[in-house]
Image (cartoon, grey):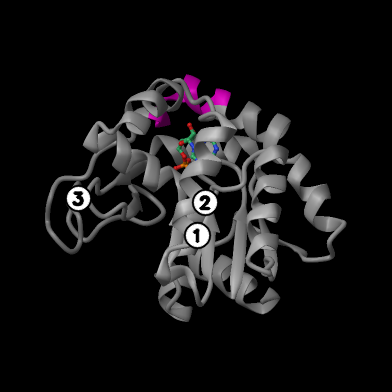
Amino acid sequence: MKILLIGPPGGGKGTQAKKLSSKFNIPQVSTGDMLRDHVKKMSKLGIKAKEFMDQGELVPDELILKMMKSKLSDDNCKNGYILDGFPRTLPQAKGLDSLLDNIDSNLDKVIIIKVDDDVIIDRMGGRRVHKNSGRIYHIKYNPPKNEGLDDITNEPLSIRSDDKKETVKNRLKIYHDLTKPLINFYNLKNILFEVDGQNEIEDVFSSIINKL
Ligand code: AMP
């Protein structure tokens, strides 16, 4: 099964992708996580990507498509995957189509997680992450068992550098301008479904499962 989650930054894609990944035992493929890994390792791509990411800008399409081409040919992606954060622009969606065409494959379902901008701005201020695993928490809506600490490792949680209010506003604008056109693109393929992302995490998860 190949599923794509589309939604605004902080709309719950990562949280839902992790839940789907463990339910269906297929990998979560998050370009954001992959890029943050490159930044941490200070790879050539990481050094280039960091300047865009810190400003809340998108990393150029060519770099993303190159990174994804090798990722999607990994053995562990053979039985499907949950795409989280890619494609994010029309050129990326077209690039993904041709990557999939080459291996005689296609996406099964595209799920839009709908969340209003003011809810996003409220959520992003409370988001905390465990850097090594990518586990995501929210101080109010999804708090860790011990304040400020990861549930599994007990290591301290941090705030993502691009979750600052001004950066979030820029990321939202980019979502509306560049990512939303994908809705029409996938609608024309008849594989698009929408869920209300403003409910509880478990309710959003059930709505997604219902669409699959
Ligand atoms: P995310 O964790 O998905 O919110 O991604 C964090 C940041 O990584 C974004 O704000 C972008 O700077 C960059 N990024 C992630 N995925 C993509 C993508 N598909 N295209 C361009 N930039 C991306």
The three-letter code of the residue at mark 2 reads Lys
Measured in 3D between alpha carbons, the distance from the residue under mark 1 to the one under mark 3, in whole angstroms, is: 37 Å
- The residue segment tinted magenta is 162-170
Callouts 2 and 3 close, C-beta under 8 Å:
no
Residue marked by disc 2? 69
Instruction: Say which of 37 and 164 sits in front.
Output: 37
Q: Main secondary structure of the magenta part?
A: helix
Q: Is residue 169 magenta?
A: yes
Q: Earlier in the sequence, mark 1 or mark 3?
A: 1
Callouts 1 and 2 close, C-beta under 8 Å:
yes
Residue beneath the point at 12% across and 51% down:
155
Residue 186 shows in the view = yes
The three-letter code of the residue at mark 3 reads Glu
Residue marked by disc 3? 147
Residue beneath the point at 70% across and 38% down:
91
**Quadrant in the picture for the C terminus:** bottom right
Quarter occupied by residue 169: top right
Measured in 3D between alpha carbons, the distance from the residue under mark 1 to the one under mark 2, in whole angstroms, is: 6 Å
Instruction: Say which of 129 and 66 sits in front.
Output: 66
Helix, strand or loop status at disc 3: loop
Residue beneath the point at 66% across and 61% down:
102
Q: Percent x, y for residue 162?
A: 40, 29
Q: Is residue 39 above or below residue 106?
A: above
Measured in 3D between alpha carbons, the distance from the residue under mark 2 to the one under mark 3, in whole angstroms, is: 39 Å
Q: Nearer the viewer, mark 2 or mark 3?
A: 2
The three-letter code of the residue at mark 1 reads Leu
Residue marked by disc 1? 72
Instruction: Say which of 1 and 73 sits in front.
Output: 73
